[in-house]
């Protein structure tokens, strides 16, 4: 086996022993916990679905009163009870009392193994055999790797994002197994994880205005193409940093009022329109507003690109085949919201049908068009 | 050096490039001498730039400073030889002087860059001084290169006549040019000018004292320009008996008429040239000396020709500005400007017409006027280039330098300050940049510096000052890490000499923790040795509790040189054993083997 530690042992010509690390005490209010860490710095080792894992584990952990302590990663994982920013030796102390440690392969996993703590190790850019924890017996360590598309990237980046193909239910089951809590499988089956699932998107339909509660820096997408009231439109554009989608040109005097907040103006252009004057694009450029023309019908693209040679023109969301088969129990998660009149919808298809507070999969072309933003699963 | 030595005022130490520290050649001069060239194993692993610096003495100059504790350092090299000297700990503590040649305008950016960092800055030609002064650097002065004027002089008319006859020359009118056959010497222009002159003066012949086997393809050009090969002469020399002969070119590896050796006669070259005495004779064969060039630092043949009382024609550019005036017994050659691709330097293309006209002018001088010009040329050269004159100027420069109070015990290179907190307000962006250069990078710059211009451009383009500060801090950190090795031998001392093992593991939390698990058995294996671990400081917590670690030292890329670390040849090394376990895992990840390989060792 080409293990990293064995390579080092061969180089120094000595046998493997245990690392010496002195724990530094750190107070915790519980001693019944598991530890978790994510890698926010190495993209190919960053697992994006720990929040789903913890959500799946929640009932089991609550039943046993087991807490989740996050030890690594700059961003707090949704679902942990406490996220600690500690020195390595304080982490060592916390690890030493952990019931199980789960995380992308790292020094913490090896240290947990040296302390005979069970581990669940997630591999994103190398073979488990090359870096699995080996200070404890194999039965204490569960190693999970993607089904490699071809080979691991062995690099900090992985254009295929292979670590994302590891299903959260598999990790959750492994954690339960390492805790010796449950042998029955978790009733959750991943059907599809869209590439843009983790992107937070807030769209508003400007038919009426209500203040939004947004994370810092969040840009609001104003869908004037879905519905329009001039007063509501202007208030959204004056209150937030916005990107606007519009079916028609916005008059220059209106744009001047909102130019400071408007980042990009997407205009749905049609082949039948009269030519948009060059002065309009110049005015946008002078106001530092990026303008993109969108085309719904792909056949119109060449003619429009010729007509507006210097302006970026893109096709709007193309129709998509369903990425998976779904049944009655299929549900979905999405970080995308469409907001109108204070109601929130998870997709355009749901907005169109007036289905707020609904996460059922809708088998319609409009729904699948946005499937890159969805995490679809089946559950009892 | 001989002038300074003769004053009996100074202890002189020469640090000579191109030879090793204790090379036998260091014993051939009357003063103390050491070579500055490191042994090959000491430069292994260095970048090409660092190797070039080592060739200029960058590595061993620190040793010389520490050992000989000079009050004055005089660097006589190309300006790029002083790269990063300004961050050497001694640079601003003792009297440092740089005496360098510059040959073109605009002044080499690197030379401008160093202007604020060099207190005593001397150039070899006044055009460079003038250009510096126009930029506001009033402390840059001209100090010419010196010549031993006793080697070159006009022979008596009788001797000159005999000499000519010995080379088969009668009443020919001989135009001479002594040069290395490089592209910056304007041979095509000279040939064209000579052709013009030849039309007016049928007796004219051209002597090109140079190597015909490199640079310009002279025979081809003669053919091209329809110049008779018989009208162009050169100097042949025998590598065996050193006899020389001036005649037209007829190929290389010729037989020596004097000693009879076969294939030993070639045109004079850098491997085998004529002696000073012979060269003096060659100048005395000439009727006029003509030196057209694109640019040059001093062009010593011009001064040698003047010392033999020849009227000299010199391109009126670069160092030629100093030696083409009538007060120097010369005449200027006019030129047109072209730019050198890449560097964009101004270079001179000398007009052939000007060469032809000036040659005619010299030919037409009355004999006594020409002799008077020649005498003036010799005296002017003695007054401006002789060892006595230049030595005296140097002596005065040294004597005016202040006393030195420096203990010479500091590290070789100053530490940069990555922790410096800039002020909250600056009067201008320029002040901000100058301040962070000075306090983080310990670098004196001004608005002419390339770095200043670059960062000013970035600021104007919207880059935030905080980003620049972070970049500077990173540079400082990397510099401090990189230069650690220079202080390593001092840090280690003699206490456990011969009993040291180093393990170099530059980075990685996992890697350092895994190495931690091997130290118990490594120490068991080598009980009498101390284990030194080298890693980046942020990984210290992953190994510093291990009781088998003797010392934990910040990693530096300069450690990646096993022969320097373990020793080779005369260098005894710093450690008995150095392990580089990261070689197959980080530098060249060659251990994976698709997770299929097996071994027969019992590693646990």
Image: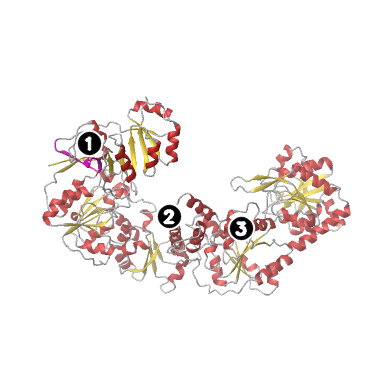
Asked if residue B242 shows in the view, the reply is: no
Q: Which residue is mark 1?
A: A351
User: Are the residues at dot 1 and dot 2 in contact (C-beta closer than 8 Å)?
Assistant: no
Q: Who comes first in sequence, dot 2 or dot 3?
A: 3
Q: Residue B496 lies in magenta, yes or no?
A: no
Q: Nearer the viewer, residue B16 or A90?
A: A90
Tell me if mark 3 has few (under 14), some (14-19) or many (20+) residues whose alpha carbon lies within 10 angstroms of its own.
some
Which is in the foreground here, disc 1 or disc 3? 1
Above/below status of B70 relative to B505: below
Dot 1 and dot 2 within a common chain: no
Give the mark toward the camera: 1 or 2. Answer: 1
Parent chain of label 1: A
Tag 3 secondary structure: loop
As for residue A349 lying within the magenta part, the answer is yes
Q: Residue A41: give x, y in percent of width and height.
A: 32, 52
Q: Work out which quarter of the rendered image holds the C terminus of chain B and state it.
A: bottom left
- Asked if badges 1 and 3 are on one and the same chain, I answer no
Q: Which residues are magenta?
A: A328-352
Q: How many marks?
A: 3
Q: Is residue A260 left or right of residue A201?
A: right
Q: Which quadrant holds residue A253?
A: top left
Whole-percent x, y for residue A261 in the image = 36, 44
Residue tagged 2: B467
Instruction: Calculate the distance from the C-alpha at mark 1 to the C-alpha at mark 2.
Output: 44 Å
Task: State the residue at coordinates (81%, 42%).
Answer: B198
Marker disc for residue B78: 3
Scheme of colours in the image: secondary structure
Which residue lies most toward the top here? A272
Look at the numbered discs 2 and 3 and tell me whether their residues touch, using CB distance below 8 Å.
no
Other residues around mark 1 within 10 Å, as few (<14) / some (14–19) / many (≥20): some
Residue A356 makes an appearance in the image: yes
């Amino acid at each position: 086996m080409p293990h990293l530690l064995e390579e080092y042992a061969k180089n120094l010509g000595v046998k493997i022993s245990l690392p010496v690390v002195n724990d530094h005490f750190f107070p915790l209010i519980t001693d019944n916990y598991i530890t978790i860490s994510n890698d926010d710095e190495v993209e190919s080792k960053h697992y994006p679905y720990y929040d789903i894992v913890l959500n799946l584990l929640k009932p089991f952990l609550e039943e046993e009163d087991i807490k989740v302590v996050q030890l690594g990663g700059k961003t707090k994982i949704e679902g942990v009870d406490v996220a600690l920013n500690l020195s390595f030796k304080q982490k060592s102390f916390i690890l030493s009392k952990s019931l199980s440690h789960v995380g992308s392969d790292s020094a913490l996993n090896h240290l947990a193994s040296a302390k005979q703590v069970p581990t669940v190790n997630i591999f994103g850019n190398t073979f488990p055999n090359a870096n699995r924890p080996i200070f404890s017996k194999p039965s204490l360590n569960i190693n999970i790797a993607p089904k490699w598309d071809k080979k691991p990237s062995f690099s900090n980046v992985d254009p295929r994002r292979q670590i994302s193909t590891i299903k959260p239910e598999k990790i959750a089951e492994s954690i339960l197994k390492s805790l010796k809590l449950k042998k029955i499988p978790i009733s959750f089956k991943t059907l599809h994880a869209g590439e843009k699932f983790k992107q937070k998107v807030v769209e508003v339909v400007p038919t009426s205005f209500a203040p939004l509660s947004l994370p810092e820096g969040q840009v609001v997408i104003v869908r004037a193409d879905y519905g329009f009231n001039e007063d509501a439109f202007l208030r959204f554009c004056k209150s937030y940093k916005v990107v606007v989608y519009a079916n028609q040109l916005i008059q220059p005097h209106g744009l001047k009022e909102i130019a400071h907040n408007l980042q990009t103006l997407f205009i749905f252009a049609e082949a039948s329109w009269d030519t948009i004057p060059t002065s309009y694009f110049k005015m946008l450029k002078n106001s530092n507003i990026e303008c993109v023309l969108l085309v719904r019908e792909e056949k119109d693209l060449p003619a429009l690109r010729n007509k507006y040679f210097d302006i970026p023109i893109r096709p709007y969301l193309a129709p998509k085949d369903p990425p998976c088969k779904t049944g009655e129990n299929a549900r979905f998660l999405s970080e995308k919201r469409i907001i109108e009149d204070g109601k929130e919808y998870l997709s355009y298809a749901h907005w169109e049908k007036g289905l707020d507070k609904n996460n059922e999969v809708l088998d319609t072309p409009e729904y699948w068009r946005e499937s890159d933003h969805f995490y679809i699963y089946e559950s009892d | 050096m001989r002038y300074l030595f003769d004053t009996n005022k100074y202890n002189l130490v020469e640090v000579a490039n191109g030879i090793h520290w204790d090379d036998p050649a260091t014993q051939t001069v009357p003063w103390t001498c050491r070579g500055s060239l490191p042994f090959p194993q000491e430069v292994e692993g260095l970048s090409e730039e660092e190797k070039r610096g080592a060739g200029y003495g960058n590595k061993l100059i620190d040793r010389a400073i520490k050992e000989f504790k000079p009050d004055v350092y005089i660097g006589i090299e190309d300006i790029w030889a002083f790269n990063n000297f300004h961050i050497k700990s001694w640079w601003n503590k003792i009297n440092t002087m740089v005496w360098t040649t510059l040959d073109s305008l605009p002044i080499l950016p690197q030379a401008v860059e160093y202007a604020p960092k060099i207190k005593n800055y001397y150039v070899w030609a006044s055009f460079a001084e003038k250009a510096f002064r126009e930029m506001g650097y009033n402390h840059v002065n001209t100090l010419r290169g010196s010549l031993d004027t006793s080697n070159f002089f006009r022979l008596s008319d009788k001797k000159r006549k005999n000499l000519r006859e010995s080379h088969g020359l009668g009443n020919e009118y001989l135009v001479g040019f002594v040069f290395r056959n490089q592209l910056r010497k304007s041979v095509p222009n000279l040939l064209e000018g000579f052709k013009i002159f030849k039309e007016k003066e049928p007796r004219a012949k051209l002597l090109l004292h140079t190597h015909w086997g490199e640079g310009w393809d002279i025979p081809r050009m003669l053919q091209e320009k329809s110049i008779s090969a018989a009208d162009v002469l050169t100097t042949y020399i025998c590598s065996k008996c050193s006899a020389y002969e001036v005649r037209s070119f007829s190929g290389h590896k010729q037989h020596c008429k004097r000693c009879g050796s076969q294939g030993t006669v070639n045109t004079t070259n850098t491997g085998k040239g004529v002696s000073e005495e012979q060269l003096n004779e060659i100048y005395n064969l000439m009727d006029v000396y003509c030196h057209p060039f694109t640019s040059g630092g001093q062009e010593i043949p011009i001064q040698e020709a003047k010392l033999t009382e020849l009227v000299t024609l010199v391109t009126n550019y670069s160092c030629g500005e100093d030696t083409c005036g009538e007060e120097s017994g010369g005449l200027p050659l006019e030129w047109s400007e072209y730019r050198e691709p890449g560097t964009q330097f101004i270079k001179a293309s000398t007009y052939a017409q000007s060469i032809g006209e000036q040659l005619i002018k010299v030919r037409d001088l009355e004999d006594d006027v020409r002799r008077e010009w020649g005498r003036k040329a010799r005296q002017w050269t003695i007054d401006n280039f002789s060892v006595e004159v230049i030595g005296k100027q140097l002596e005065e420069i040294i004597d005016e330098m202040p006393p030195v109070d420096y203990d010479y015990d500091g590290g070789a290179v100053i530490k940069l300050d990555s922790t410096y907190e800039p002020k909250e307000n600056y009067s201008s962006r320029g002040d901000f940049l100058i301040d962070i250069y000075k306090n983080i990078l310990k670098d004196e710059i001004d608005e002419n510096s390339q770095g200043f211009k670059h960062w000013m451009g970035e600021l104007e383009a919207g880059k935030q000052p905080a980003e620049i500060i972070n970049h500077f801090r990173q540079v400082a950190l990397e510099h401090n890490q990189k230069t650690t090795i220079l202080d390593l031998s001092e840090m280690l001392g003699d206490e456990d000499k011969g009993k040291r093992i180093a393990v170099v593991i530059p980075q990685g939390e996992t890697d350092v923790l895994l190495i931690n698990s091997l130290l118990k058995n490594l120490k068991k294996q080598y009980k009498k040795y101390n284990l030194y671990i080298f890693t980046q400081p942020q990984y210290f917590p992953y190994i510093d509790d291990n009781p088998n670690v003797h010392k934990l030292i910040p990693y530096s890329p300069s450690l990646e040189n096993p022969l320097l670390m373990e020793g080779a040849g005369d260098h005894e090394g710093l450690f008995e054993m150095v392990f580089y376990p990261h070689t197959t895992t980080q530098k060249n990840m060659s251990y994976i083997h698709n997770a299929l390989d097996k071994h027969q060792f019992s590693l646990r």
